[in-house]
Image (cartoon, helix red, strand yellow):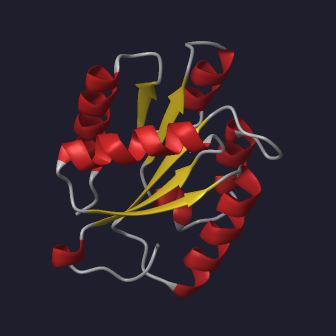
């Protein structure tokens, strides 16, 4: 992921999600969206930061999107968002956050300039539609 892309190769999407079932739900929703997505999954904010740090120095990430679960082990979602500000290039990529609730974390994420929010408490059909529409609205050109 986060490698150089041309228009035919699609969008790189780094999913930061620790729950295997949630990963499968996102994968299924992405298939339903019929978007050309190159998906890579990391289980926590620590691995996401490592991947983004390497990408910021070695690759062209302009056609990338970060899809972030706010409730993560180790470096949580909000911590990851704060740390992204330290990296000039990755912060330029769209960040979509997901959560099972609308709470302080979601409000705090919006204060950290996230591009979109997808609630996880929707039915699968609603989640898939919302995720697809949100990704389409932020696809880098």
**Count of labels shown?**
0
In the image, taking residue 32 as reference, residue 84 lies left or right, namely right
Question: Where is residue 29 shown, x and y percent of the image?
Answer: 31, 40
Q: Quadrant of residue 99?
A: top right
- In this rendering, the answer to whether 2 lies above or below 57 is above
Depth check: give the residue in front, 75 or 29. 29
Name the residue rendered at 33%, 67% in the picture: 63
Between 69 and 56, which is closer to the camera in this rendering?
Answer: 69
Residue at image position (23%, 76%) is 9
**Residue 112 x/y as whole percent:** 59, 36
Eyeballing the image, is 87 above or below 102?
Answer: below
- Identify the residue shown where x is 42% and y is 38%: 25
Image quadrant where residue 129 sits: top left
- On the image, the x and y values in percent for residue 41 come to 54, 58
The structure residue drawn at horizontal position 63% and vertical position 33%, both measured from the top left corner, is: 70
The image position of residue 117, as x and y in percent, is: 43, 29
């Amino acid at each position: 992921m986060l490698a150089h892309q041309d228009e035919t190769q699609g969008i790189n999407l780094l999913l930061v999600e620790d729950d295997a079932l949630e990963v499968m739900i996102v994968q299924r929703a992405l298939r339903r969206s019929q978007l050309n997505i190159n998906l890579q999954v990391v289980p926590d904010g620590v691995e996401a930061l490592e991947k983004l740090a390497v990408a910021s120095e070695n690759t062209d990430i302009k056609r990338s999107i970060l899809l972030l679960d706010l409730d993560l082990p180790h470096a949580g979602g909000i911590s990851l968002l704060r740390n992204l500000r330290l990296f000039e290039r990755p912060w330029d990529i769209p960040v979509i956050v997901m959560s099972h609730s609308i709470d302080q974390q979601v409000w705090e994420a919006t204060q950290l300039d996230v591009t979109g929010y997808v609630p996880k408490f929707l039915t699968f059909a609603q989640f898939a539609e919302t995720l697809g529409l949100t990704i389409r609205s932020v696809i880098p050109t």
